[in-house]
Image (spheres, rainbow, N blue to C red):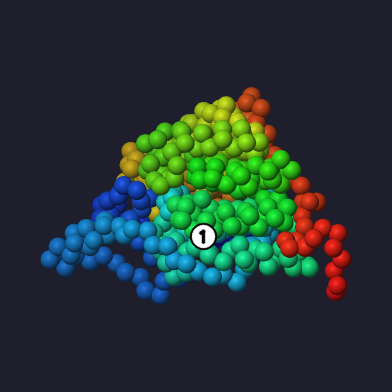
Amino acid sequence: MHSDPAAAPAPCAPAPPALVPSALAPRKGRGTVWAIEHRFSSMQTQALDDGWGSLDQAAQEEHVAPGTRVIEESVRSILTGNDSPDIGFDLSINPYRGCEHGCIYCYARPTHSYLNLSPGLDFETRIIAKVNAAERLRETLSGRSYTPLSLNIGSATDAYQPAERKLGITRGVIEVLSQARHPFSVITKSAMIERDLDLIAPMAADRLAAAYVSITTLDPELARKLEPRAASPARRLRTIEALARAGVPVGVSVSPVIPFLNEPELEKILAAAAEAGATTAFSIVLRLPWEVNPLFQQWLRQHVPERADRVMARVREMRGGKDNEHRFGVRMTGQGVWAQLLRQRFEKACARLGLSRQRIELDLSRFRPPGRVPGQAELF
């Protein structure tokens, strides 16, 4: 199974109707207020003015975005296998589905389609919490056939989004991993990871844990629009400092790189992260799978209309003339002259700053199934 929901071949989603940008005004604290229909919808709707102001009324109702609703769910399994050759881990754990951070560019938005929910507004307001995640993980790791593999937490959601403050699902998962001495990495935009340093730091000392902090921009105004409920860029830099001081190997993800938007900041972001204590770095260019494409193009027209056409023209230049490219090997990096120049800039900046471009290596040899006494013989 692909851990990346956008890995499977997908046609480019159509651009949003002309009506959408004017009908749905942005709302503070939400990446989008567009409840875009997903690709599996059996019904498709089209706006129609009946002469009685119905379009204006619908726009007003849509603008009043609902608050976040957390839906608790018991799952049968919590580990997801990965066979994507351009992803550097074998297993992933996503304690939640959907993400309240509301990053408009998030490639995981289409996963809400499988729940019959909108990849737009629902993705950031209807959060599925896998409340028995720790229990299921313990059962899996205790299985006689389980073999430890490289494991990442938060590949399709942020494991430290606001719901985690109350539910503590991610902390429960890390407690099980700690007891089992199972190595893991975690990627986040949240400062809440600092709460779990009492678990993560001792594991990191034994080469069992690593963290990656995603920093898309250093501009707080742009960050509020791109990723409205994630930690501010300055706060994420302080999180890198806290992780590094605690002895946790930490990397920075400058992703996604969006032409003419955050792309000019690439070197500055890397420099700020290195100064804060990051030792590794990676970067992925903007991807627009499925419903992310019309959502992002709508966002561009709302927030940076003067640059919207220019941004999309450069995206298509990196994607062989298409809005999105799903093929392994080029979907993360892009192709063409501009993509090559971008890679060269990244590589030179990393070399100058002493940032490794290799994943942080962890020790798989220390694993012991939870509940089993070291050296204890099995009866069967």
Please state the horizontal and vertical placement of residue 17, each as a whole percent of the image.
32, 58
For the C terminus, the image quarter is bottom right
Badge 1 density bin: few <14, some 14–19, many ≥20, Cα 10 Å: many
From the viewer's side, name the closer residue of 171 and 55: 171
Task: Give whichever of 290, 115 is nearer the camera.
Answer: 115
Give residue 227's position: percent from left, percent from top.
42, 45
- When asked about the image quadrant of residue 180, the answer is bottom right
The residue lying furthest to the left in this view is 52
Image quadrant assignment for residue 62: bottom left
Question: Picture coordinates of residue 343 (x, y %)?
Answer: 60, 36
Seen at 63% across and 55% down, the residue is: 175
Could you say which is closer to the camera, residue 207 or residue 178? 178
- Nearer to us in this view, 15 or 226: 226
Q: For the N terminus, which image quadrant?
A: bottom right
Q: Position of residue 244 (x, y in %)?
A: 61, 34
| Badge count | 1
Q: Secondary structure at mark 1?
A: strand
Residue in view at x 57 percent, y 47 percent:
196
Q: Is residue 184 above or below residue 72?
A: above
Amino acid at circle 1: Tyr
Q: Residue at x 33, y 38 (%)?
A: 306
Which residue shows up at 33% across the image and 55% down it? 33
Residue located beneath label 1 in the image: 96
Q: Kindly tell me whether residue 142 is visible in this rendering.
A: yes
Q: Is residue 256 left or right of residue 83?
A: left
Asked whether residue 340 is in view, the answer is no
Left or right: residue 217 compared with residue 144: left
Q: Residue extending furthest top?
A: 352
